[in-house]
Image (cartoon, helix red, strand yellow):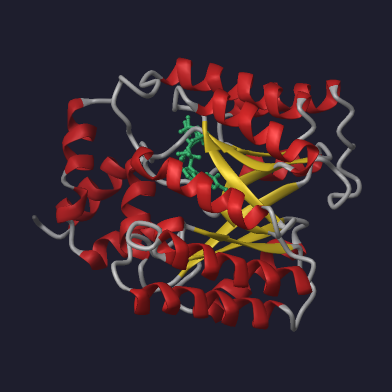
Amino acid sequence: MSLFDRVVRLGLPLVPRRMVWILARRYVAGETLESALDEIREQGARGFGTILDVLGEAVKSKERAEGAAAEYHRALAALAQSPSRTYVSVKPTHLGLTFDPALCGRLLDDLCVRAAEQGRKVRFEMEDAPTVDRTLEVFLRVRAKRENLGCVLQARLFRTPDDVTRLLRELGGGLDVRLVKGIYLEPAEIAHTEAPDISRAYVDLARQLVAGGAFAAFATHDDDVAAACAQIARDAGLGDGRDPDAARYEYQMLMGVKAPMAERLLAEGHPVRIYVPYGKDWHAYSIRRLRKNPEVARHIARAFFSRGG
Ligand SMILES: Cc1cc2nc3c(=O)[nH]c(=O)nc-3n(C[C@H](O)[C@H](O)[C@H](O)COP(=O)(O)OP(=O)(O)OC[C@H]3O[C@@H](n4cnc5c(N)ncnc54)[C@H](O)[C@@H]3O)c2cc1C
């Protein structure tokens, strides 16, 4: 990454919201549930499954956590009106994990019950390293009652192979994991920091999950990692993708990122699900996405200079 790119990325939080929105709208369906439902319909028509995410995180009050849960219930009620291969994904700190893990567990449990009535899954996401223990604790407590709950594990963390071993011991083939590289930059004492090491760790974990019989959702836009995962799935005979609901693996990608790769994976016969986030809290999510995008510095520079700045 050039020094210029680095400086622009560090300065992203200072960029006016309106300008961030111009760049970010490809990653976010919109502010309203209706915009997300439109996107889900479009992705469904192209053959993709979808994942609905209500944007928000790090809430600090019971009211905000309950408000987030209420929005998920509203979304599930709307999804019930039309058939779609969609499930919901929720950040632990959006449901109050940081200040009240018991509340977070109750809200998650209610969501699982409502989603199960419609035959949908709930995915409990993973955030930064200090939240991992509590997230897995809440996950396991709720998962003991609700089979439709899955979790997320991050390849960059040194601890993850041990977490996989533990989760496989507790849940066996009932374990359902979205495997990601991990978006939160963590210190070198606890995490890989170099891209090749993270990719290697990812592929090793994919192999460990598949060998243990877990359902594996390969959430990546990295062509090499995705190809290695396809080989792992093929070697294990994990379904040919013709019936996406029967396969024991899938790919997951973010709305607005590498759409041609998603099309190609689908055309090759793999089940693919697109992550569709929506909501008023799009700013923090978008800044994280834009930081990952090498085009961002150029976009911002162009927008800045064309304003005569
Ligand atoms: C469905 C889904 C859910 C996720 N959930 C979580 C979660 O719960 N917790 C968590 O920590 N992380 C989560 N992530 C993020 C993940 O950890 C990675 O940060 C992110 O996917 C980028 O890693 P990568 O595997 O795509 O590889 P990278 O090496 O980062 O990217 C591969 C290539 O993809 C392209 N690319 C990647 N991101 C962008 C972008 N924003 N804009 C344009 N091009 C891009 C670039 O060309 C890049 O070279 C999720 C990712 C997905 C796809």
Q: Position of residue 213 (x, y in %)?
A: 80, 32
The quarter of the displayed image where residue 47 is located: bottom right
Q: Is residue 283 above or below residue 7?
A: below
Q: Position of residue 39 (x, y in %)?
A: 61, 68
The front one of 16 and 55 is 55
Residue at (66%, 82%) from the top-left corner? Answer: 78
Disc tally is 0
Quarter in which the C terminus is drawn: bottom left
Horizontal relation, residue 121 to residue 68: left or right: right
Residue farthest along the left direction in this orientation: 309
Q: Position of residue 98 (x, y in %)?
A: 34, 57
Residue at (34%, 48%) from the top-left corner? Answer: 288
The quarter of the displayed image where residue 275 is located: bottom right
Is residue 149 visible from the viewing direction of this image?
Answer: yes
Q: Is residue 94 above or below residue 183?
A: below
Q: Position of residue 205 (x, y in %)?
A: 62, 24
Q: Is residue 295 above or below residue 223?
A: below
The quarter of the displayed image where residue 156 is located: top left
Horizontal relation, residue 2 to residue 90: left or right: left
The front one of 107 and 115 is 107
The front one of 125 and 62 is 62
Is residue 224 visible from the viewing direction of this image?
Answer: no
Quarter in which the N terminus is drawn: top left
The front one of 156 and 144 is 144
Horizontal relation, residue 302 to residue 193: left or right: left
